[in-house]
Image (cartoon, rainbow, N blue to C red):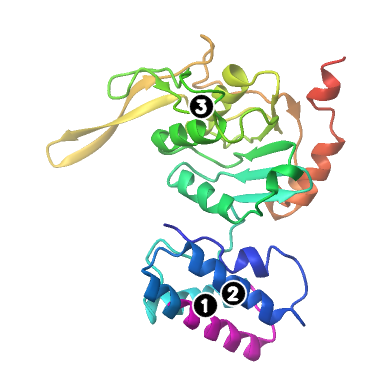
Amino acid sequence: MRIIALIGAILIALNSPLHATDIEKIESAVKLFQKLANLPPDQKDRCGEILRSRLSASMKTTGSIDNDSIVAVGKKMYDDDKCLDKYSSLGREEKWWVQISGSYLFLNIKYFDRAFTELSDGFRMLPDDWRSSVNTVVIDLRGNRGGDINDLRDILDYYFAPRKGVIYMEVEATDYPPYQVTTRKGILAGIPIIILTDPDTASAAEWMIAVLRFYWFPDTTLIVGPKGTFGKAIIQCGRAAGHFFMQLTCGEWMIADQKVNGVGIEPDRTKDLKECGNNGRNEACVAEALSKMILWQKSSAQ
């Protein structure tokens, strides 16, 4: 299991000063680590104590716990304490995969390779009552160039499927099933969706847009971006050739007979969010910008 932002989620994302509540926050971080860490019970206790000690020492030395100190602690727990595996992290420079800002639930999907695991870990960080404050899902696919379509399949099925037994991801490809079938109703099904895109959004990311916007939820899904997406709607398959391994195009998917490859998908609302800093990924700023736009609730009456 990837343990993402165990400390960052509490000490950074809380966005509050570290003064009288330092000890409480460290204890919360330790408890969260012990809850999510993929370790035997005795190792959880040992590593939890190590984490508590290292964070306390960092606090005494620097007076605060920032992202750099979190990464340093994680490195020591991996290199010296053997408390983390190679897939684990106590802090990252990137934005977390799942965040809430106001009434918006942000899914920051950077690529499709272990994205299902990243999202699952991110949801575990949310408060138990997160549903009560959310009325819109924002899927940020800006810069997402695609990846593993099996990862995409699992995300669509678990999070967004309208119901069990729905055919999706239909394609004509030599090395890939002609379609997939949902196994459940997704945990986010029925919540309005905004998809953020840019010209680098491509491949599996475009396929996700196609499924949500043009098939499953056409009335409650909107695409927002500065211009159209990249336009890569092909399936690539591996072929052995002597001592070499080649990736060859073996299929192409379309939207209701509309070509995507080489064309891309145009946004429903044209908006460049770069003014929101951090490469346009300041969730609070994005949420405010979206709230001021004419979205489906208003445009449907025009």
Q: Residues within 10 Å of mark 2 (few under 14, many from 20)?
A: few
Instruction: Please give the residue where the numbered disc 1 appears in the rendered image.
Output: 72
Answer whether residue 54 is magenta in the image: yes
Q: Residue at x 78, y 51 (%)?
A: 284
Dot 3 or dot 2: first in sequence order is 2
| Above or below 221: residue 284 | below
Q: Cβ–Cβ below 8 Å for labels 2 and 1?
A: yes
Q: Marks 1/3: CA distance?
A: 38 Å
Q: Residue furthest left?
A: 242
Say which quarter of the image contains residue 105. top right
In what element is the residue under mark 3? helix
Residue 37 sits in quarter: bottom left
Whole-percent x, y for residue 60 in the image: 64, 90
Q: Which mark is residue 68?
A: 2
Precedes in sequence: disc 1 or disc 3: 1
**Residue that mark 3 sits on:** 207
Q: Is 10 situated left or right of 251 in this image? A: right
* Residues shaded magenta: 47-66
The location of residue 117, given as percent across then percent down, is: 46, 48
Amino acid under label 3? Trp
Main SS of the magenta segment? helix
Q: Residues within 10 Å of mark 1 (few under 14, many from 20)?
A: some
Percent x, y of residue 234: 41, 24
User: Which residue: 83% across, 44% down?
Assistant: 288
At label 2, the amino acid type is Asp
